[in-house]
Amino acid sequence: MKKILFFSAVAVSLFIGCEKNADLSIEQKEAARIAVPFATLGTTLPATSESTCAGPYTVVLESVTSNGDGTYTWTWSVQNPNPGNGTNGTIQNLSHWDITLGACVTFEDVVSGATSTNGTDWTAFTPSFEVDNSFNTPNCNMTTVNVLKFDLGTTAAAKSYYRLTIDKNVDVDPAVTAYYKSGATTKCGTFCFAGFGCEVEEGCSFSQGYWFAKPNLVWPDVNGADEGNVTIGGHFYTQAEGKAIWNSSNAGGIADTKKAFLQVAAIKLSADNVLVTATVWDDVQIVETWLSSLPKLTPANLKNWKNKDAAAAAGRIGDWITLNHCE
C-alpha cells in the first residue's frame, strides 16, 4: 500500500533548516505531530528566499512517496516560466537536465527512474551515473563530474515530470547541484534544486508480541501515571485492558479496531525509541483519529466498527516496525 508523505511542493528557492527535537516530552512530541504535517517536522520553511543558485527553469519537488517496502519515490517537475527563442528575456525550451545525488545518497541507492510529459503517463528508464558529454562543447564546457541524466525537456510553458525511486529514506536538501541544457542562445548552466539530503532518523519500536505476549513484562509509564498504561484515540487503557484486547477472539478475522489498537499501542509503548521525525507517525495519526470517534474499546465491542483506511494504516505501521524493530 503506497502512502504519500504530504510534502508541500518544494521549489528550488526554499531554504530548509533542520531542528532536532530530542529533548521534547512525549506529550510535546504528540502535539507537534498533530499541529505540523510530516513534511515540516524538524524543519523551517521561511516565507522569503535566500537562494542565489536557482536556474532559469522552475524546478519543484512535487512529492516524496513511501512505497511500504523500504523504497521511496521522489517526483519533480520542471517548467519554463518564460518560453521563447532566448531573446528579450525569454528562455528556450529545456533540452534535458542532470542532477548530482547530494552528500548522502550514492548511485547504489537508486532503484529506478521515469519521466512524464503530463504527470500521469510515465516512461521508465534505466538510470546511469556518468559524465554527460553533451556539456563538453564550446557552448558549455562546464562539467566532467558524474551525473544522473533526465533525458526529457520542456515544451512551451507546460510542466515536465521526473521520478526517481531510491532505497533510502532521506530528508530534503534544498541546494543539491544540477545542470541544465537548452538551445544555442540560453545554452547551459548550473543551479540548485530540492534534492536528496541525508537519512531521516526513524528510531525503532518493539513489536506487539513484545508488549502483549512477553511474560512478566510491565508496561512503562508513558502517560505520567503510576500504573503502566497508554492513551490511544483519547481513551486511557491499563495494561490489563490492553492484554484483554490482545487475548480477544479472532474468529472471523482480526477486527479492524483490534489491529489498529495493537499496532498503535506498540508504537506508543516504545516511547522515545520512535523518533519524532519517524514516518510512522502519519499512520498513527490516521488510526488515532478514527479511534477517537469511537467509544473505548473492549473485547466485547471490537467487531462493531470497520474502517479500511485505518486498517491499511495499521498494516503499514506493522511494516514499519518490521523494518525498524528495536534489538
Image: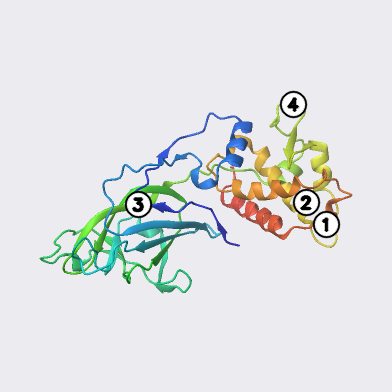
Q: Are marks 2 and 1 in contact (CB under 8 Å)?
A: yes
Mark closer to the observer (4, 1): 4
Which residue type does callout 2 highlight? Lys
The x and y percentages for residue 95 are 26, 69
User: For the view shown, which residue lies furthest in the right direction?
Assistant: 300
Q: Which residue is mark 3?
A: 12
Which residue type does callout 3 highlight? Val
Label 1's element? loop
The x and y percentages for residue 61 are 41, 56
Label 2's element? helix
* Marks 2 and 1, the one that precedes in the sequence: 1
Q: Is residue 1 above or below residue 232?
A: below
Q: Are marks 1 and 3 in contact (CB under 8 Å)?
A: no
Q: Residue at x 59, y 35 (%)?
A: 29
Which disc, if any, is residue 250?
Answer: 1
Q: Are marks 3 and 4 in contact (CB under 8 Å)?
A: no
Q: Which residue is mark 4?
A: 225
Q: Residue at x 85, y 60 (%)?
A: 251
* Marks 3 and 2, the one that precedes in the sequence: 3
Q: Is residue 125 above or below residue 268?
A: below
CA distance for labels 4 and 1: 31 Å
Q: Which residue is mark 2?
A: 258
| Residue 79: quarter of image | bottom left
